[in-house]
Amino acid sequence: MADDSAPLPLRTQVRDVLDGQVDNGTHAVVIGAFVEVITAGHEQSGLWARGLFVDDTGAVKFWLFPRAFMRTDRKYLDGATQVVVNARVSVSESPALLVNHVSRSGLRDFLTESAP
């Protein structure tokens, strides 16, 4: 059972990722929406998605690999649904979010806090 008294992880804004203020490999919690989503499949590993993740500060590429894709409700990829994303930041070629988990739970808590 989740500990309701545990502090929420710090929220990261897309602009911070794009500006290089977030190190490669850093865990990030970002609030926004998926847009320009392209899904594809691989015979052995399954479905995956890529596109842009946007918040009010910018847009960054995202990758949602098969394991995370299987756990993600497809309605969250519609471009209109605001979600909380847990991801690892990748800056190897260009900034991107490697998404581990997508949820709407806790969204209200994040939105009532001031952004860093």
Image (cartoon, grey):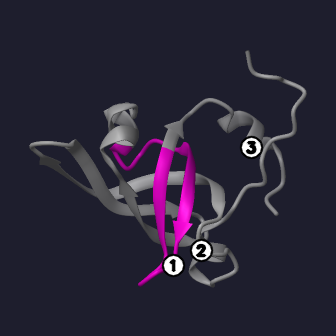
Classed neighbour count for the residue bearing mark 3: other residues with Cα under 10 Å, few (<14), some (14–19), many (≥20): some
Q: Mark 2 or mark 3, which has the lower sequence index?
A: 2
Query: Pointer 2 and pointer 1: residues touching (CB < 8 Å)?
Result: yes
Residue behind mark 3? 110
Residue 37, placed above or below residue 96: above
Residue 54: x and y in percent read: 49, 62
**For residue 70, which numbered disc appears in the image?**
none
Residue 92 is one of the magenta-drawn residues: yes
Q: Which residues are magenta?
A: 77-100
Q: Secondary structure at mark 2?
A: loop
**Furthest-right residue in view?**
5
Residue behind mark 2? 24
Q: Secondary structure at mark 1?
A: loop
Classed neighbour count for the residue bearing mark 2: other residues with Cα under 10 Å, few (<14), some (14–19), many (≥20): some
Residue 73: x and y in percent read: 37, 31
Q: Amino acid at mark 3?
A: Phe
Residue 84: x and y in percent read: 58, 44
Left or right of 22 on screen, residue 5: right
Front-lying residue, 45 or 3: 45
Q: Secondary structure at mark 3?
A: helix
Q: Amino acid at mark 1?
A: Val
Residue 91, placed above or below residue 89: below
At x 66%, y 65%, the residue is 13
Quarter occupied by the C terminus: bottom right
Q: Nearer the viewer, mark 2 or mark 3?
A: 2
Q: CA distance from mark 2 to mark 3?
A: 23 Å
Left or right of 41 on screen, residue 27: right
Q: CA distance from mark 3 to mark 1?
A: 25 Å
